[in-house]
Image: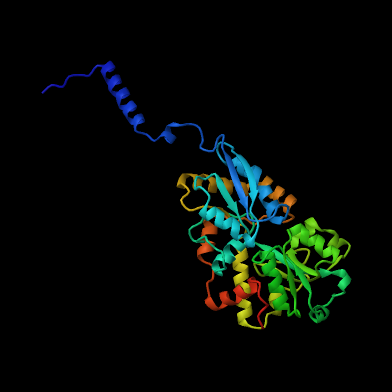
Amino acid sequence: MRLKKCKPKFLARVALSGLLTYLLFLPGDVLSQTPFYQGKTITIIQGREPGGTGDMRVRAVLPYLRKYIPGNPAIVTEFIPGAGGRKAANHIYRSVRPDGLTIGNVGTGLVANAILGEPGVQYDLDKLIYLGSPNSATHYVFVTRKELGLNSLERLRGASGLRIGAQSVGHDIYINGRLFAWILGLKDPKFVTGYSGPEVDLALMRGEVDARVNIADTVLQRTPDWVEKRLVDFHAILEIPIGDKHPRFAHLPELEAFARSDRERKLLALNRAFRLTGSPYILPPGTPKERVQILQEAIRKTFQDPEFHKEFKKLSGDDPTPLMPEAHERAIKELPRDAEVIALFKKLAGAELLPPR
């Protein structure tokens, strides 16, 4: 049987018809050349007061995140402080529309509050979507007002009723303040809350509180006079991870040196694990996968940008120690969940009196 040759015009019509049929059934977003985020506004909800270290870290991220999201959307921030980040986390988990246009940034209390089963936690840590954190390693120092004359461990332990300032019950500065007080063996310490981060500094200088914990690099960036003019006494440091020496405070004893038992060392290890998850950028469950991937890739590029590193250092006083999205998800899954140690940590994180050692 002899086949007939097809005419070129007929072949062209068939090809065109097939192409039109293919395009007709493609999803609209494949046909569109306009990035999803073009012309849109992303809101970043912060679980803190404005002006503190956490806010400075977010400000450092914003211009680079906008740069690396295709479409370069506008980015604005809102603040929902309170309950150690629980209010903001609950809002993001329960109330935010999962459309990729609202991102949360909550401090380390996000993880600690959930693992400890603190009252008011209405989010599932394992169902949130993680975009990463610009900080994971850090150092906390414990300081007292110079006027108190507590320039030795013996004098510090001999002082009764020291007022230790912090933001709120459950905030990581509050928890670390309680941890220092307990491990150092302070006598009947009092914990005064209701401040923002910078307000605790002012309260210390005015004599409204006697002591506080802060991030070492924040001290150097925000209150350099404390070091240069010796306005405070520095007593101990908490290294996260342990062994990561701070160049300016390497002479301070590490808090674990004061631990008396394996239980106390395990408590410090759990605290370090919480802090290594950093200040997570999160999305609510149900956010479309393709938008999650866009935001995760933008975060990766932001954290890898040398100019971001400079801006982060400038605004927060600290070098970034990024935790990428995949590592962040893995860190959440691998958190220690020892019931006995968690029960002890929960007492330290709460508002009740410190437990006996």
Q: Is residue 3 left or right of residue 357?
A: left
Query: Is any part of residue 243 visible from this angle?
Result: no
Quarter of the image with the N terminus in it: top left
The residue at 59%/67% (across/down) is 273
Residue 276 position by quadrant: bottom right
Q: Is residue 13 above or below residue 142?
A: above
Residue 113 in picture, x, y percent from top left: 58, 66
The residue at 66%/65% (across/down) is 172
Q: Is residue 218 above or below residue 180?
A: above
Residue occupying the far left of the picture: 1
Query: Is any part of residue 25 visible from this angle?
Result: yes
Residue 148 in picture, x, y percent from top left: 86, 73
Q: Is residue 277 left or right of residue 158?
A: left
Quarter of the image with the C terminus in it: bottom right
Residue 356 position by quadrant: bottom right
Q: Is residue 310 left or right of residue 295?
A: right
The residue at 28%/17% (across/down) is 8
Residue 167 in picture, x, y percent from top left: 71, 62
Q: How is the image coloured?
A: rainbow
